[in-house]
Amino acid sequence: MEITDQTWADLHQAAVSAMQRAYCPYSHYPVGAAALVDDGRIVSGCNVENAGYGVTLCAECGVISELINTGGGHLVAFACVNAHQEATAPCGRCRQILFEHGGPDLMLAMPGGLMRMDEVLPRGFGPWNVREVTGEDPENGGSNER
Ligand code: THU
C-alpha cells in the first residue's frame, strides 16, 4: 500500500472530523485519530471520556474498534490531531495498541514529522513474542503477522 502526500492529507482530514466529534467534557482536550489500512480503507476515532476519569477511551481505541469491526487488516499509516488540528503524539498505552495492528513498519505523523513505529515504540512487544512461546496463532484472521 503506497503512502503519498494525499494519504497524509486524507488521514489529517479524517482525524480532524473525528476530533470534532470527541466527547471530552472533563479535559476539554478533543483528539481525533485516523489510520490507513492495507486494503485502502481509512478508519478513525475520537476520545470518549467518562466520569470515572481513568476509564476514558483514547481516540486510538476508536480507530482499532472500527478496524476490527469493519473487517480487520493491517495499519500502514496513522495520524492523530488535537484541537488546533496539529499532530499530537499517541500516549504510551496507545503506542502498544497501535503496535499490535501496525507492527514496526507503521508510519506515524508525529509532531516533529513522520516516524516509524519502531522509533516511536522501540523493541516493542508484539503478537509474535506470544507466538514464539505458545506456538499458537492469535485467533484474529492472521491480521497480526509481522
Ligand atoms: N488522548 C487520546 O485520545 N489519545 C492519546 O494518545 C492521548 C490522550 C485523550 C485522552 C483524554 O480524553 C484527553 O486526550 C486528555 O488526556
Image (cartoon, rainbow, N blue to C red):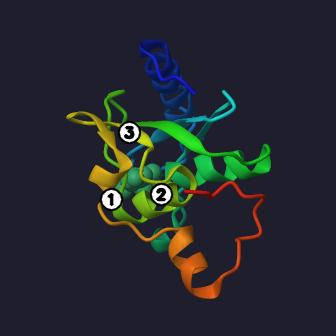
Of 145 and 95, the residue lying toward us: 145
Of 110 and 49, the residue lying toward us: 110
The quarter holding residue 121 reads bottom left
Q: Is residue 76 visible?
A: yes
Mark found first going from the N terminus, 2 or 1: 2
In the rendered image, which residue does mark 2 sit on?
99
Judged from the image, the secondary structure of the residue bearing numbered disc 1 is loop
Mark found first going from the N terminus, 3 or 2: 2
The quarter holding residue 143 reads bottom right
Is 45 situated left or right of 15 in this image?
right
On the rendered image, what quadrant is the C terminus found in? bottom right
Q: Amino acid at mark 1?
A: Leu
On the rendered image, what quadrant is the N terminus found in? top right
Mark found first going from the N terminus, 3 or 1: 3
Q: Amino acid at mark 3?
A: Leu
Tell how many labels: 3
Disc 1 CB within 8 Å of nearest ligand 1 atom: no
Percent coordinates x, y for residue 62 in the rendering: 61, 50
Q: Tell me if label 2 and label 1 are in contact, CB under 8 Å.
A: yes
Judged from the image, the secondary structure of the residue bearing numbered disc 3 is strand
Q: Tell me if label 3 and label 2 are in contact, CB under 8 Å.
A: no
Percent coordinates x, y for residue 12 in the rendering: 45, 24
Is 25 situated left or right of 136 in this image?
left
Q: Amino acid at mark 2?
A: Phe
In the rendered image, which residue does mark 1 sit on?
121
Task: Give the spatial CA distance, label 3 vs label 2.
Answer: 11 Å
Residue found at x 52% / y 19%: 10
Task: Give the spatial CA distance, label 2 vs label 1.
Answer: 8 Å
Q: Is residue 26 visible?
A: no
Percent coordinates x, y for residue 30 in the rendering: 43, 42
Instruction: From this view, report whether residue 137 is shown above or below residue 103.
Output: below
Task: Give the spatial CA distance, label 3 vs label 1.
Answer: 11 Å
